[in-house]
């Protein structure tokens, strides 16, 4: 019985955790006016664990099933009376109570790690009511439609795609390319959501950072247009420098998610470079940054057309890289990363990481850093085209200084 005690404790803890959130939300209600509070939810989890233990001891699963049914009927009856009194049609409390009982049973009779994780996740979802409702109000039909189509293409289309290379060089694996495309879009979507939640007048710095989570090149071009229209150029260049730092942190996130073995090679150079961008960007923005500005209009990364364009470019880059590697050698990967990283660092980094298991880590890491460097050059090119010299010249100087510092960090590793 000794191993049973901590499992029962977990079942009780799950109920108390969820009851804490439910009780806090209804803390102003008079005592005895609510069906369940922190104690009731805690006891419900413990009850589920006890019935699961009895079912296991007697080897009769119908005990837990009957107990769950009786609990559900009793709990729903009390909730029905409460709802009629309050004229409330929400069923969230009922579902939460049933989940507590079920998770208590899972903690004792099944995978206790899964039960603990599910209990924490359920509490987080319940506590995020206002955030989720606010997000739903801001959601547009175009965004919802794109997300639904992507879900169908991922859940249905991804398993149907062949999981082997269909080109002679082994670079074009449809399932792998589509999976990495979805992963990149998911990371970008975090920035898109941040942009939507922040609104349109939250300040130059915030809008630049949020927009950079989607595309630092787009931020650079947008700020260049602002500078050309007469806005203060130095603060805009500083905000673009912050956007460049966010782009490098995006690269680190992708590397950590897909091929963390490369982190020892790229971590120090990229962090040094990002730090220089932040420090210099802060100095430029201190020269009289405006209090507010229009947010970057970020494209929805879940838009189907954009996904297909990204996937097509990624597939072409991956196939070209595989062909060049088979004919020239591993060093050609760096050239491919530079060529594809000028305007889209994600494609270049994903292409480099795809070949991680087939070549030395140093080559892969160098290709990732070369892609980030090429993307910095692409941003300067865009800045020159979109803005006046008083905008792109400080940004170019900061970029050169940051690139030099990052190169020094790289030499420290491989000296």
Image (cartoon, rainbow, N blue to C red):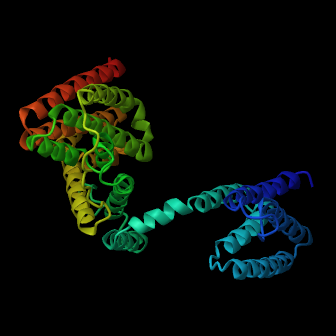
Q: Quadrant of the C terminus?
A: top left
Residue 16 visible here: yes
User: Closest to the observer: 79 or 382?
Assistant: 79
**Total label count?**
0
Tell me where residue 243 sits by quadrant.
top left
Q: Name the residue at 74% across, 66% down.
A: 100
In the drawing, does residue 272 fall left or right of residue 137? left
Left or right: 364, with 114 as reference point: left
Residue at the image position 30 percent from the left and 43 percent from the top:
203
Residue 63 lies, with reference to residue 387, above or below; the image says below
Q: Position of residue 402 (x, y in %)?
A: 25, 26
Residue 142 vs residue 330, the one in the foreground: 142
Instruction: Decide if residue 145 is on the left or right side of residue 18.
Output: left
- Give how far across and how far down residue 127 sits, in percent: 60, 58
Q: Is residue 44 left or right of residue 394?
A: right
Q: Is residue 2 above or below residue 126?
A: above
Q: Residue 96, position in %: x, y? A: 69, 68
Classify residue 151 by image quadrant: bottom left
Q: Nearer the viewer, residue 88 or 408?
A: 88
**The N terminus sits in image quarter:** bottom right
Determine if residue 370 is in view. Answer: no
Seen at 25% across and 44% down, the residue is 216
Q: Is residue 344 above or below residue 389?
A: below
At 72% from the left edge and 80% from the top edge, which residue is drawn? 85
- In the rendered image, residue 15, in percent from the top left (x then y), is placed at 76, 60
């Amino acid at each position: 019985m000794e191993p049973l005690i901590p499992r029962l404790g977990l079942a009780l803890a799950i109920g108390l955790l969820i009851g804490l959130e439910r009780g806090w939300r209804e803390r102003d209600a008079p005592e005895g006016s609510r069906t369940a509070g922190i104690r009731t939810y805690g006891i419900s989890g413990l009850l589920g664990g006890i019935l699961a233990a009895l079912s296991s001891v007697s080897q009769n699963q119908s005990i837990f099933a009957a107990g769950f049914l009786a609990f559900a009927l009793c709990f729903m009856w009390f909730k029905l009376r409460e709802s009629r009194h309050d004229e409330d049609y929400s069923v969230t409390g009922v579902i939460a109570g049933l989940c507590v009982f079920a998770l208590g049973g899972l903690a004792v009779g099944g995978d206790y790690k899964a039960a603990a994780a599910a209990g924490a996740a359920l509490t987080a979802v319940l506590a995020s009511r206002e955030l989720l409702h606010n997000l739903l109000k801001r959601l547009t039909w175009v965004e919802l439609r794109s997300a639904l189509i992507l879900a169908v293409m991922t859940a249905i289309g991804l398993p149907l795609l062949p999981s082997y290379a269909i080109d002679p060089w082994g670079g074009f694996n449809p399932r792998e390319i589509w999976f990495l495309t979805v992963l990149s879009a998911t990371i970008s979507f975090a920035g898109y959501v941040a942009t939507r939640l922040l609104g349109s007048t939250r300040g130059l710095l915030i809008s630049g950072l949020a927009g950079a989570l989607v595309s630092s090149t787009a931020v650079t071009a947008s700020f260049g247009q602002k500078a050309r229209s007469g806005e203060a150029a130095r603060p805009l260049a500083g905000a673009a420098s912050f956007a460049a730092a966010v782009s490098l942190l995006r690269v680190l996130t992708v590397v950590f998610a897909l091929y963390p073995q490369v982190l020892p090679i790229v971590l120090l150079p990229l962090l040094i470079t990002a730090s220089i961008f932040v420090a210099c960007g802060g100095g430029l923005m201190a020269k009289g940054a405006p209090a507010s500005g229009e947010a970057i209009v970020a494209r929805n990364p879940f838009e189907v057309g954009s996904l297909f364009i990204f996937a097509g470019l990624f597939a072409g880059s991956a196939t070209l890289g595989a062909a060049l590697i088979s004919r020239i050698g591993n060093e050609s990967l760096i050239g491919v990363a530079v060529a594809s990283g000028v305007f889209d660092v994600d494609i270049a980094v994903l292409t480099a990481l795809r070949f991680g298991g087939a070549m030395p880590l140093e080559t892969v890491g160098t290709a990732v850093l070369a892609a980030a460097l090429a993307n910095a050059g692409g941003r300067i090119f865009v800045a020159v085209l979109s803005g006046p010299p008083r905008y792109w010249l400080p940004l170019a100087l900061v970029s050169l200084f940051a690139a030099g510092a990052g190169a020094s960090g790289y030499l420290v590793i491989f000296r």
